[in-house]
Amino acid sequence: MTTIDFDRDALASTMPDAVSDHLRSSGFGDPADAWRILEQIDRRVAPLARPGNPFPALVEAAAASLEPDRALISLHTLFTRCGEDHVPALLDLLAIPSESRDALLTILSCSPYLSNVLIQDAGFLLDTFAGDSWRALQSAEELDAELTEMLQGVSSPDEAMKPLRTFKKRTYLRIAVCDLMKQSGTPAVLERLTDVADLCLQAAHDVCGMKLEARHGRPMLEGSKPSGFAVIGMGKLGGRDLNFSSDIDLLYVYDATDGRTEKDGTSTYEFYPKLARAITDLIGRLTPDGQVFRVDLRLRPEGRAGDIANSIEGYRWHYEIQGQAWQRQALLKARCSAGSREVGGRFLETIQPFVFYPALDQPLILEDINHMRERIAKALIERGSGDYHVKLGKGGIREIEFIAQGFQLVYGGSQSWPWERGTRRMLASLAEKGYLSDDEASDLDDAYLFLRDLENRIQMTSGHQTHEIPQDRGAQTVLAGMMGLSWTTPEEREAAPDRMLSAYARHTARVHQIYDRVFHSAM
C-alpha cells in the first residue's frame, strides 16, 4: 500500500487534499473523522517526544485491517486509556508491519467486545502481541496451571469473582486470536473453549465447597465414607463443542440424600443445593467485571420448578417414571464437567438405560424430533429470522445435530453403540455403520465445521449469544473477512459478502437435503 507522510504540525489544521484522498483510497469511510482521530492520538503521544512520526504506520496498520474506521477508533481509545508507561511499547508494536500487528488490528477492527478486553488491560495486550504467544492454543494443563496461580490465596467465592472473570476473558481472547489468524483448526478451538468452562466450574466447585465445609463440615455417608457432588455438562458443553459465547447447560447431582455433615449434621439434601446455588452465583453473577458464563439449569427435572440439585436416585426415579423423549435426546450430551468423577460416572451409568433402551417406538422417536424441528422453524418464521439463523435455520447446525441424535436414539440401545457425545464423531460412526453414505457424512462434517466457524465469529463480534448472520452489508463484509475471505481491490471487498453467503447457502441446502432423506424415509 502506498504511504504518505503525515505532517504532525498539520494535524491541528485543515486536512490536505492529498491526505484525504489517501485515507479514502485506504478504505476509511470518512477521512475527516479519521483526521480528527489522528489529531486526538497526537495529543496523547506528543508529550513523549519520541523520535519519528508514528502516523503513517498507524494509518497503514488500520487500513490493512478488516474495518479501518473501527480499527482507528479502537486505537484512539486504547491510547487514551492506557497508562503512559505502556504507550512507548504500544507505538513500537504498531511501528513495523508484522503478523503480531496484523493479529492485534484484526481484533481491534472486528470485535468491540474483545477490543474492550485489550483496552482495559494494556499490559496483557503487550504480553500477548509483543511476542508469539498468540500463535498457539494453550493446553488444558497450561490453562489449569494459570488459573491455579490466579486463584492462589483465594478462600471465598467473593474473592474468586474477579480472577475467574479475568481468566475467562484473557483465555477467550487468546483463543479468538489464534482462531481468526488460522493458527488452529475449528475442532481444537471448540475443545479449548470447553476446557476453559470445565476449569472454571471445577474452581467454582472447589472454592464454594471449601466455604460451605468450613461452616458445616464435610458431608459424609454411613460408614464414614465421604459424600460427593458432580457438575454435569449438557448441550455443547457436554459434547465438548462449546461456542465462543455459549451459555452453559448444567445439571447438579450428588450421591445420596441421607448423608450428614461432620460439624453440624446438615443433611446432604440441604447441603448440596446450597453448593449448587453458590456455584451458579459465582459463575453466573453479572459484576462490573462481567460474568464467567451464563448458566442455564432448565434441563433439570421439572425445569425451573424442580430442585436445583438431585441425588442419583432422584434422577433415576424421575427419568423412569416421568422421563420424556426430549430428555433422552438432551441426555445424549451429558458429561461430568466438574466435581466428583466417581459421582459423575455413577450418574451416567444410572441414566444410560433410560437414554439407550432398546427402542420399540422408532417412528415415534423420529416424529418427536421432526416435530421439534418444525416448531423451531415456525418460531423463526414468526420473528422473521429464519433465513440467516446459523443454528436453527433450515440446514443449520441443529439439523445436523438432530440427524446424529436421531440415529443414536433409534439404534444406540438395540445395537449397544458406544456413548458418543460429539456430533462430528457420531457422523463418522454413522458412515462406518452404513446409515450415512461417505459423501453424506463428509458433506455434513464440512457443513458443521463451516457453520460452527461462522457462529463463533458472529459471537466474537459482540460477545453475545447470537446465531444470526447480520443483515447490514458492512457487517457482512467484516464477517466475510473473519471467515478468511481476502480482497485486494474495492471490487473484491464489495463481493466478499456474496461469496460468504453463497457458501452458506450451499452448505445449508445440502444439510437440509440429507435431513429430509433421513427423517422422511425409513432409517
Image (spheres, rainbow, N blue to C red):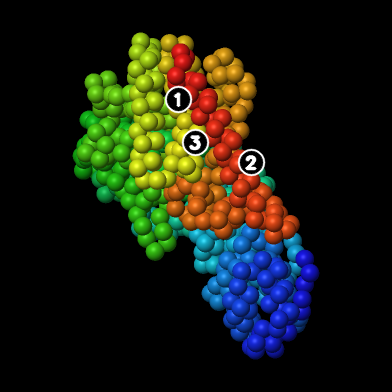
**In the depicted structure, whether residue 85 falls above or below residue 385:** below
The answer to which of marks 3 and 1 sits earlier in the sequence is 3
Query: Looking at numbered disc 2 in the image, what kind of residue is underneath it?
Result: Gly
Secondary structure under the numbered disc 2 in the rendered image:
loop
Residues at marks 3 and 1, CA–CA distance in whole angstroms: 15 Å
Q: Say which quadrant the N terminus sits in.
A: bottom right
| Residue 469 relative to residue 186: left or right | left
Residue at 22%, 30% in the rendered image: 258
Residue 149 pos. (x, y %)? 52, 54
Callouts 1 and 2 close, C-beta under 8 Å: no
Secondary structure under the numbered disc 3 in the rendered image:
loop
Callouts 2 and 3 close, C-beta under 8 Å: no
Q: Which residue is mark 3?
A: 396
Of badges 2 and 3, the one in the foreground is 3
| Residue 307 relative to residue 112: left or right | left
**In the depicted structure, whether residue 16 falls above or below residue 268:** below
Say whether residue 132 is visible. Answer: no
Q: Which residue is mark 1?
A: 405
Secondary structure under the numbered disc 1 in the rendered image:
helix
**In the depicted structure, whether residue 318 falls above or below residue 492:** above
Say whether residue 303 is visible. Answer: yes
Q: Which residue is mark 2?
A: 185
Of badges 3 and 1, the one in the foreground is 3
Residue 108 pos. (x, y %)? 59, 63
Task: Using a 10 Å C-alpha cutoff, classify the residue at mark 1 as few (fewer than 14 neighbours), some (14 to 19) or many (20 or more).
Answer: many
